[in-house]
Image (tube, rainbow, N blue to C red):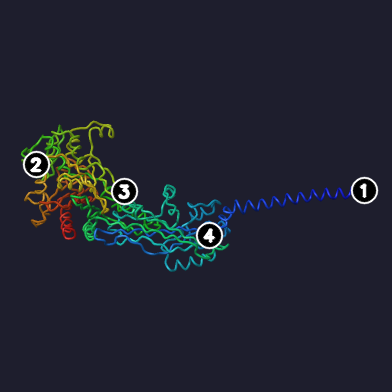
Amino acid sequence: MSKLKDDKRLFTRRAFIFSGIKLCFFISIVSRLSFLQIFRSSHYKLLSDRNRIIVNQILPARGKILDSKNKVLANNKFSYTAILDLIDILADNKSTVIETLIKEKKLDDKIIDNLKTLPNLINRNNRFVLMQEDLTWDDLAGYYILASKIPGIVIEKVQTRYYLYPKQFSHVIGYIGSPTKEDIENSENTALSLPIAKIGKTCIEKEYDDLLFGKSGIEQIEVNSRRQFVRAIDNIESIPGQNINLTINLDLQVEVYNILSEHESSACVVMDVNTGAVLAFVSYPGFDSNLFTKKVSSKALKEYYDNPYKPMINKIISGLYAPGSVFKIVTGLTGLHEGVITEHTRFHCSGFCELGRHKFHCWKNKYGGHGSMNLQEALAQSCDVYFYNVAKLLSPDKIAATARDFGLGTKTGIDLPNEKMGLIPTKKWKKENKKQKWTKGDTFNMSIGQGFVLTTPIQLARMMSILVNGLNPITPYLHQIKAKINPEKLKYKESHIEIILEGLYDVVNSGYGTARRSAIEDPDFEMAGKTGSSQVCRITEAQRKLGQTVSDDYWKKEHAVFVGYAPADEPKYSVAVIVEHGGGGARTAAPIAQNILQATRRYVY
């Protein structure tokens, strides 16, 4: 009996212990479930939604670019793009996918090699691979067949950039392209990680990318376990980019391009002298902007970059040229401003000017020189010797100060990237950069726009605009709302400016001016300006004796320059023309300027 009681007591104790264990286990399960359902439900719901819901960004339509009269220059068109989503590859057999891609030859070898070392961690910066853009109908059919074999291939209908005048505006509008890794990492715009995202790469497209890009939208869709579309959940529409009106006149731009196309390499800019609005802006040859909106073949790139006439360089803001005799405007004005000459000061030109044992020649050396010249006559006939004599009386730093007042050697501030400063040398500059002392010969060369002096065509057009607009330091601009007028006028005497302008008028309209053959025979729209010939190689004394002052070799010919304005009595437009290796400015650049100013009158005046 006692044994039975002990067994019963033992059983009851064991039952109690097991029941306690069960109770503890039950409580722990209930507690865990309660914790998961009450405190962690949002976390697991989020994980579930990530598998069930896909959030896609919707790229906005890029803003249009229009000319000054609302004619469309850059628009958008629909096309199809094939994309590979790497998340789906990770979920599948990677080696099978790569084998299929190699067989189908749908990706470059470099991209396939990268896929072989594909990391397991995928983020927004490396999730997508762009396979092919601007698909033809045959391409599209092929990718749809391939998508049935490979998960992750997505066909996107996208809006791509389309340039209506791709060559004529290549150096104004520029082009768009895929953002680089650095672009994505440095931007707060998460839409740039999308494989179909494009940003401005050059010119206006780059300068105003924030305005043109717009604001991306959001699309939420539900998918099944195989990531196939089930239904749309939510949608936030994208906001299109802003349209931009340029100051450029389309008809004038096209005509300028056609005029410049008669020469291998040239540039021209036309500007409103009072506001700085750019009316035409052509760097020839141009390039096909539409080619760069998608992946460019290495062969096509090589053809452009190996082209000796440099179509990829924007010559107007990045081309550096010795201004030649155009710079005599600066030297003459400095002489007047510093009081070392007056309008009546005369120097005799016998064809050269001696400095020590060295002769500095005038372009009219083989004809015995110009004879006695005052400033107005020296500008009209572009007498080098006159300005050598002025240079004897001036410090190079004084000439440099005047040049900088008129915007030479500094960026103009035009609303385009990659503008170059040019160079207006000083004594200090030569000592620091050449480790040499400045010589009087350097001042001679500087006085006629040679030596170390380098300018851009946009600087020369701005210089002429300031000279004729009442000394208002304007800033060139291309976006219509960008106008910026500097209220402080330059402090030069009006009487001195008038002397210079009379000389520039005679360059074209007198019987002895260097550009007299390019005069516009209309008293209501006469042209004035200055010719220049920018030497690219030195002419030796032996060559001069043989009369070989002009080379037959294209690459050794001087650059032809002309900077002018019209109408001469009430200036409205300035023009700068440079023809690389075009010979004399009077022979080549001045007739071009005449035709372009007359075209400006037809389309803008």
Q: Is residue 57 left or right of residue 76?
A: right
Tell me where residue 187 appears, x and y as whole percent.
42, 49
Nearest the viewer among 338 and 57 is 57
Amino acid type, mark 1: Lys
Sequence order check, earlier mark of 3 and 1: 1
Q: Distance between the residues labelled 2 and 1?
A: 137 Å
Q: Is residue 66 left or right of residue 527?
A: right
- Name, please, the residue furthest toward the top: 437
Residue on which the image places disc 3: 417
437 w.r.t. 582: above or below: above
Q: Is mark 1 on a helix, strand or loop?
A: helix
Q: How far apart are marks 4 and 3 (CA)?
A: 42 Å
User: Can residue 414 be seen in the rendering of this structure?
Assistant: yes
Sequence order check, earlier mark of 4 and 1: 1
Residue on which the image places disc 1: 3
Contact, mark 4 vs mark 1 (Cβ under 8 Å): no
Rendered image: mark on residue 495 = 2
Sequence order check, earlier mark of 2 and 1: 1
Residue on which the image places disc 4: 53
Nearest the viewer among 138 and 261 is 138
